[in-house]
Image (cartoon, rainbow, N blue to C red):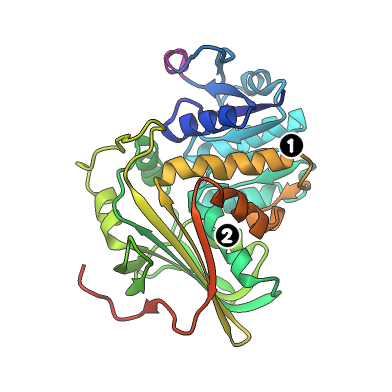
Amino acid sequence: MTRIAVFGATGHTGRFVVDEIERRGLIPLRIGRDARKLAASDAAGREPGRIASIDDPRSLDAAIAGAGAVINCAGPFLDTAHAVIDAALRAGIPYLDLSAEQAAVQSILRDYRDAPVPIVPAAAFFGGLADLLATAAADGEPYVDAIDIAVGLDSWHPTEGTRLTGRRNTAPRVVQRGGKLEQVPVPPPTARWDFSDPIGPREVLMLPFSETIAIRSHLQARDIMSWINVEPIRDLRDPATPPPEAIDEHGRSAQSFSVDVVVTGKGRRRRATALGRDIYAVTAPIVVEAAQRLLAGEGRGGVHSLGAMFDALSFLAALAEDAVQITLADLSAHPLQRTPIDA
């Protein structure tokens, strides 16, 4: 039976990933840096957790021994990605991570482009999902005029890992304009985006994540812009906002999301949308679907985003079976309006 190593298995998202691996009939090799947390996540039938540190290559090598792939769930990825990728290279197995950090994905693309094994950064809600939607909406066009991405969240109760990454990730955020990366202005522009229900029309601000880097790595577009509604950013910036609270047997929170991607080019405007619940929980089926496809031989060496590595329509169809609701449609009017509405 195939084993998938999970570095950061005791974190909030790491636990979802472990559960998803088991749900698919595979075996997770749980790797962590805290023996007590690993012991607390033990369960009947699970293999014992393994201790490893990014500062100790030998411990990483021992921890991923016997795995067919490794998923890095331990951010900030600016700090962990290179060490875990190097271990994957020594073991000769695919690497995947959940990075929302633009700088982390840029450094992986720069340093591991010619890797002999598949390396898939940003295989998560932030980064990978928008990349898949953009690839599907581009519909095989080699060049498009514009790709506009909007994330709508009814709330955001951040994990401690999210807060830690935010403090660590101080690099200026970038969008693509005229085929070149440029920094987001300070303060960022605001606008209005007409999301589908249950999010609806919202004021949004320009705030790109790793999807910008993922998309531009394989799709040629003049402009790539990313937006998010203002309410979850207020939650994120408020130190009093509590972490996510589980409301069902799967550990998911009540948070709703909508990811809208509009691709414009050659007289056509096409919209791809993903609707679902809990941005942390939905990351698990995204990254484990990717890992399972790599284990089945669907992939190639080097650094590739989800949209570049896999058939986007097939991948989204797999997610739509039980994780998200996916729609693709041509549009007459763009959902982005530059005049913001009241928050």
Q: Main secondary structure of the magenta part?
A: helix
Residue 95 in picture, x, y percent from top left? 66, 38
Question: Which residue is drawn at the image coordinates 58% and 39% (left, top)?
Answer: 81
Question: Which residue is drawn at the image coordinates 58% and 73% (left, top)?
Answer: 180
Seen from this angle, which residue lies furthest front? 321
For the image, the number of numbered tags is 2
Vertical position of residue 239 compared to residue 189: above or below: above
Which residue is at the front of the view, 266 or 225? Answer: 266
Find disc 1 in the rendering and name its residue: 295
Q: Is residue 305 something one can see in this rendering?
A: no
Where does the C terminus fall, quadrant-wise? bottom left
Residue 292 in picture, x, y percent from top left? 68, 38
Sequence-wise first label, 2 or 1: 2
Where does the N terminus fall, quadrant-wise? top right
Question: Which residue is drawn at the image coordinates 57% and 35% (left, top)?
Answer: 72
Provide the secondary structure element on which disc 2 rests.
Answer: helix
Please report the bounds of the magenta region as a residue range.
Answer: 34-40
Q: Residues within 10 Å of mark 2 (few under 14, many from 20)?
A: many
Find disc 2 in the rendering and name its residue: 131
